[in-house]
Image (cartoon, helix red, strand yellow):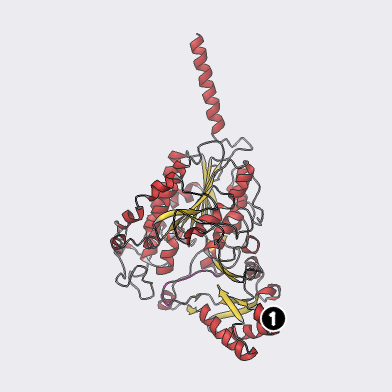
Amino acid sequence: MKEKLITLLLLFHCSVAFTQNKPNLSNQNARPKLVVGLVIDQMRWDFLYRYYDRYTNDGFKRLMRDGFNCENTFIPYYPTVTAAGHASIYTGTSPAIHGIVGNDWYDYDQQKSMYCTEDKNVTSVGTSNNNGKMSPKNMLVTTIGDELKLATNFRSKVIGIALKDRGSILPAGHSADAAYWYDKKTGNFITSSYYETALPQWVLDFNAPKRVLDYYQQDWNTLYPIQTYLQSDNDINTYEAHEFDSTQNGFPYNLKKYAEQNDFDKIFSTPQGNALTMEFAKTAIKKEQLGKDSITDLLAVSISSTDYIGHAFGPNSIETEDTYLRLDREIAAFLKYLDIEIGKNNYTLFLSADHGVAHVPGFLEKHKLPNNIVSGSDSKKKLNNHLKEKFGYDSIIIANFKNQFYLNFNAIEKHQLDKNKIIESAISFLNTIDGVDRVLDYTAMHKAMLPQELKEQFTKGYYPRRCGDILVILKPGYLDTKYETGTQHSVWNPYDAHIPLLFYGYGINKGKTYTKTYMTDIAPTITSLLHIQMPSGCIGNTIDDVIKK
């Protein structure tokens, strides 16, 4: 009898413990065990539907079918680029507040061009080169992960993973346990001393086999017979870039040669780069024991290869279509892994993008659609020549990034020039360039004759000490690039600013909305679900229909 009583008590104790560990929506403070952010670099919203018929039932379709789809999600600021996008998703605010105004900018305080995550005060960990000298210090506000850390007295684990450093570091935030990115010089995932003094053993073990070389052995041919890619342009086009070498103009792509050359860089421009990222993410979940206790963890994963492939071949290429069909399978396998490792109702996942992409100008030309190229670097050179003729001095424009031109205030002050007259003359000259829609004094956006929504979009991208003084707005379909092949992004237009947004898993309703939502609404929606404070600069709103009541 005594033994039976002890057995019953043990069973009751285990049952109670299990119930306590399992999330329960009736508990006002209940949270998922793991939050996963999945950002697809350069994924346009229409890619959800462009290739829908050939997606499996378990990847994108599963998220759309069983999760919540915000069909009309936009980026509310300019410029639409990788660093700004990743920062805005996880902070719930815009460059005007978080300070990440681009991938690069001219910093007036430091009097030099800056890369978004550069940090000369840290050292590389996992490599001997400078590719690891990075941190989130240039981002001025907190992220979802930072607030989760604060809410749990820093017991939560927060990790960022991507091939790109900025796709890993900015989402992870300031207080992250780790951020890992790929070093193209060594073929390893690395980090910086901002996070750790040495790579964990599991990362060393992951790096040891040089997995990228194994991925190269697969080469890159189409997943299906190439003639069945009806959603894409022809395979070989003169307006597509030679992303590998001049001897490879189309499918199949020989990647084995890069293994023989120990060329670790080419993986960025292949679907295998996405597979490598997902493999590393799954390993991180297992080795770091993410989602294994009652304290919610966060894993921020960014898929980078889609961006490199999109830039080179464009959104209408077989390369892009094949990449998304393969990525769909990677997402399906990742969701299955989360089901097994974390538990089907124990994690919350959101999927979005940092920006979209424009059509390749040559493709638009072929189909008689408006297009052309406007080189910002050429415009800067011509503008400086014009200003020299008018004011008598060289280099009055010190830099240009993403259609923004920066004034050389040292030269203006030294030569006692009239800044307002310089801006007026520069605007007049730039307006003569073919493809320019209009030119504005970026420091006086309130005076601009623009629709209010566009005015707000440019204002939300403006941080005074990191943005230019003169803003050029190009005509739709026109690109700021110096290349005759491939494509770009960064403008306000829907092809760059309309992005997917899917929520799935614990605490998420099934359904969709066509109400306009914004990239900056992601962070407050997730923090509302977690019952934690929104990030310190957040200006977005919770998407109420997403969360189960």
Q: Quadrant of the C terminus?
A: top right
Return the x and y of residue 50 as percentages of the image width and height: 43, 61
Question: Is residue 101 depicted above or below 58 in this figure?
Answer: below
Q: Position of residue 491 (x, y in %)?
A: 55, 70
In the displayed structure, does residue 520 sit left or right of residue 219?
Answer: right
Look at the image and say whether residue 486 sits in the magenta stretch: yes
Identify the residue at image location x=68%, y=85%.
Answer: 415
Which residue carries the number 1 mark? 413
Q: Quadrant of residue 241?
A: bottom left
Which residue type does callout 1 highlight? Answer: Glu
User: Magenta segment, principal secondary structure?
Assistant: loop
Camera-nearest residue between 172 and 200:
200
Q: Residue at x 64, y 58 (%)?
A: 140
The relative height of residue 420 versus residue 527 in the rendered view (above or below) is below
Q: Magenta segment range?
A: 483-491
Residue 328 inside the magenta-drawn segment? no
SS of the residue under disc 1: helix
